[in-house]
Image (spheres, rainbow, N blue to C red):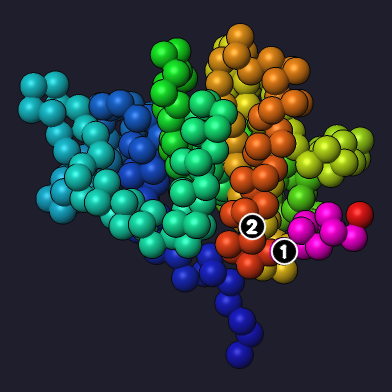
Amino acid sequence: MPARGKESYSIQSVDNALDVLEALCEEGDEVRISQLSEKLGMNKTSVFRLLATFENRGYVEREKGSGKYRLGLSAYEMGQKFLSRMNLLRKARPVMERLVRQCNEAVYLAVPRDAYILLLDMVDTSAQVKIVSLVGNRYALNETAAGKVVLAYTPTPADAHAGAGAKKGQKSPSLSQQEILHIHREGVSSDIDSLGEGIVSVAVPVFRTGGELAGCLCCVGPDFRMTEDRIRGEISPQLKEASDIISSKLGYLGRFFTKEQG
């Protein structure tokens, strides 16, 4: 009997329901049925029925005055339970807290999700001027420092990230060989304005057992504090050290051995 692909077991109604929930999550603020209907190309009646089902289970809440919808406490609770059980997050959090005390800039843990980089967790700075939280935001891999690290350290990135995140006919994200070699040589990538105007981000890879990329550690701050000299002399070395610690907690010791041999 021939093997069946995962797509052949897909249930359209469940797909539609998840599309609505994900669209509601992406919007962030409260949204109307008409907005979701237009965004997803679904008729308003179908969207309303799906939202009503989610509302009954607490995954969606409706504002009585405006009739707009937002994510409910059940969705938040499920997300928190997932994060609390995630091994990478548990290992990284204490190291991130220490790193923030050292550099006094916001530190993010980012993970690849299809053709995007997802900012999964953050420890904020105590500095008076800070960047609004970007946790939960997704960005195209080839547009951000963290995304470029993912592409540089993922084998055959065009194949690895041409899945659900890349729409049919859409070119898969990739880096030039020169960019890949530069990131491998420096062990770090940086950018400005990709996360917002005047925002600088610096990212390094985090590995798990076997040298597989687990995610990225990112330092994010305003450009007037995150100068090129400070990135090179302070931020990058601190990020790399923190990344080495997290990677070792995940079972990867390759970079420590490399340092000893060098």
Q: Name the residue: 33% across, 44% down.
A: 21
Q: Name the residue: 76% across, 26% down.
A: 232
Q: Quadrant of residue 228?
A: top right
> Would you call the spot at circle 2 few (<14 residues within 10 Å), some (14-19), or many (20 or more)?
many
Question: Which residue was labeled with disc 2?
Answer: 247
In this picture, residue 23 sits left or right of residue 145: left
Count of numbered circles in the view: 2
Q: Quadrant of the N terminus?
A: bottom right
Assign a secondary structure to mark 1. Answer: loop
- The x, y position of residue 41, in whole percent, is 41, 36
Q: Which residues are magenta?
A: 253-261
> Would you call the spot at circle 1 few (<14 residues within 10 Å), some (14-19), or many (20 or more)?
some
- The x, y position of residue 235, in whole percent, is 66, 29
Q: Do labels 2 and 1 touch, CB within 8 Å?
A: yes
What is the three-letter code of the residue carrying label 1?
Leu
Q: Nearer the viewer, residue 41 or 258?
A: 258
Magenta-colored stretch includes residue 243: no
Residue 84 in view in this figure: yes
Q: Quadrant of residue 193?
A: top right
Question: Which residue was labeled with disc 1?
Answer: 253
User: Alpha-carbon distance for marks 2 and 1?
Assistant: 7 Å
- The x, y position of residue 202, in whole percent, is 66, 30
